[in-house]
Image (spheres, helix red, strand yellow):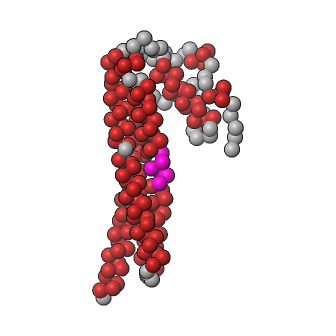
């Protein structure tokens, strides 16, 4: 893993001079806080999905280990476990984004907005992007900073992918269970 110098995570002042954000008024700060809190609450759904996914994966694994199943049913249960693994990746990212948006909502709240540097939002986003790039978690984009709306859309896209992975997992377990019941009945 590549080590980074902690001082490189903070942008020098001259690199931030080109970034001029709208002044953070009370109304702008309240809107930011509300939008970030709303998205963080929406992303909290990811924790429940993760728990359901774990239960489905345990059920699928128990079925594979405990029962003697036809090949097609075993493949369905394996698909469920694979979908559960993918869901877990999305769940980790969704949880990270939920915590991040919650932190930003608190940091940029209307209570702390007055008398604040009007470029603080752009500076925070730039430093966050730079930190992700330095850790190897994002592609460096130079001084191009993703705006907050694209970040919110990206988080919603991750949550939709997590929902899809759990739906695939549920469908695979349900089909396998029906197949087992039909094979036992006939």
Q: What stretch is highlighted in magenta?
A: 88-93
18 versus 43 height, above or below = above
The answer to whether residue 26 is left or right of residue 54 is: left
Residue 48 in the image, given as x and y percentages of width and height: 36, 52
Identify the main secondary structure in magenta: helix
Indicate whether residue 138 is drawn in magenta.
no
Looking at the image, can residue 82 be seen? Answer: yes
Residue farthest toward the top in the current orientation of the protein? 115
Q: Which of 140 and 7 is in front in this view?
A: 7
Residue at the image position 39 percent from the left and 63 percent from the top: 55
The answer to whether residue 186 is left or right of residue 12 is: left
Residue 114 in the image, given as x and y percentages of width and height: 39, 13
Residue 106 in the image, given as x and y percentages of width and height: 41, 28
Quadrant in the picture for the C terminus: bottom left
116 versus 56 height, above or below = above
Quadrant in the picture for the N terminus: top right
Q: Quadrant of residue 35?
A: top left
Figure disc tally: 0
54 versus 162 height, above or below = below
Residue farthest toward the bottom in the current orientation of the protein? 186
Residue at the image position 44 percent from the left and 44 percent from the top: 95
Residue 100 in the image, given as x and y percentages of width and height: 46, 35
Residue at the image position 47 percent from the left and 41 percent from the top: 96
Residue at the image position 34 percent from the left and 16 percent from the top: 26
Looking at the image, can residue 166 be seen? Answer: no
The answer to whether residue 43 is left or right of residue 88 is: left
């Amino acid at each position: 893993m590549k080590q980074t110098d902690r001082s490189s995570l903070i942008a020098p002042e001259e690199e931030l001079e080109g970034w001029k954000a709208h002044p953070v008024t009370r109304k702008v700060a309240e809107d930011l806080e509300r939008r970030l809190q709303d998205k963080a609450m929406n992303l909290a759904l990811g924790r429940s999905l993760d728990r359901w996914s774990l239960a489905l994966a345990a059920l699928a694994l128990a079925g594979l280990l405990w029962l003697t199943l036809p090949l097609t049913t075993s493949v369905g249960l394996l698909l469920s476990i694979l979908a559960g693994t993918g869901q877990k990746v999305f769940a980790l990212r969704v949880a990270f984004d939920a915590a991040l948006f919650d932190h930003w909502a608190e940091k940029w709240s209307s209570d702390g907005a007055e008398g604040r540097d009007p470029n603080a939002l752009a500076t925070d986003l730039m430093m966050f992007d730079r930190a992700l790039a330095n850790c190897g978690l994002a592609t460096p984009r130079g001084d191009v900073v993703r705006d907050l709306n694209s970040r919110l859309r990206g988080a919603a896209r991750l949550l939709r992918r997590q929902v899809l992975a759990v739906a695939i997992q549920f469908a695979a377990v349900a089909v396998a269970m029906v197949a087992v019941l039909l094979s036992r009945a006939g």
